[in-house]
Image (tube, rainbow, N blue to C red):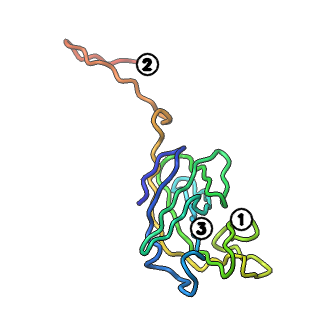
Amino acid sequence: MIQAITESTIKANLSTEDNRIDTSVASTQIRHLVKFINDMDGSVQYAYGAVETIYNRYTDFQFLYNTTPNIYEGKTKLIPSGSWKYEVYEVSWIGTVTVSAGNAPASETDVLSPAADTKGVVQGIVTKGKLNLTDKSGTAQVQYTQREADESTNYIYYGQ
């Protein structure tokens, strides 16, 4: 499970190498497309990691918050807070890896044509899980005012 705060950089270490699909290329030829799905309204956002470092057993991801999401630059706008699901898809290249429009698939079903060594191919899903997104301090939809307890009698405050 990923724990994150709204309007901030999301950092995650996800197990990807245990389930690697395309073992015919080096890890430098692999990137991961992450699909974020909101549990409340079903909205979907895609993003490649702004920073993605593949280690022997896992991948270190960073996704940047931005009011203008950009799938290829790893910029997301995951709002509202709450429970999200994520699915991580392996994308591999034979030639030069370029994460940009026309060179990297924009979804798990996107097939780039005409085929070329410089165009990524979605190999399949390598991991999935939950993302718990918490409100940034002071931005919650419901805000409470805490009052000092009276020393004598208990009071109920109405509409204040």
Looking at the image, which residue is at 56% across and 84% down?
22
Which quadrant is the N terminus positioned in?
A: bottom left
For disc 2, the marked residue is 159
Instruction: Give the label on residue 100, or none.
Output: 1
| Amino acid carrying mark 2 in the image | Gly
Discs 3/1, front? 1
Looking at the image, which residue is at 60% across and 52% down?
76
Residue 24 horizontal/vertical position (percent): 57, 87
Looking at the image, which residue is at 45% across and 45% down?
134
Determine the residue located farthest toward the top in the rendered image. Answer: 152
**Alpha carbon of mark 3 to alpha carbon of mark 1: how far?**
12 Å
Looking at the image, which residue is at 48% across and 39% down?
136
Q: Nearer the viewer, residue 55 or 143?
A: 55
Determine the residue located farthest toward the bottom in the rendered image. Answer: 24
Q: Sequence order check: which comes first, mark 3 or mark 1?
A: 3
Discs 1/2, front? 1
Q: Sequence order check: which comes first, mark 1 or mark 2?
A: 1
Which quadrant is the C terminus positioned in?
A: top left
Say which element carries label 3. Answer: strand
Residue 124 horizontal/vertical position (percent): 57, 78
Q: Sequence order check: which comes first, mark 2 or mark 3?
A: 3
Pointer 3 and pointer 1: residues touching (CB < 8 Å)? no
**Alpha carbon of mark 1 to alpha carbon of mark 2: how far?**
54 Å
Q: Is residue 77 above or below residue 149?
A: below
Q: Is residue 95 above or below residue 76?
A: below
Instruction: Give the label on residue 73, or none.
Output: none
Instruction: Give the label on residue 33, or none.
Output: 3
Residue 98 horizontal/vertical position (percent): 69, 69
| Amino acid carrying mark 1 in the image | Ser
Determine the residue located farthest toward the right in the rendered image. Answer: 114
| Amino acid carrying mark 3 in the image | Leu
Say which element carries label 1. Answer: loop
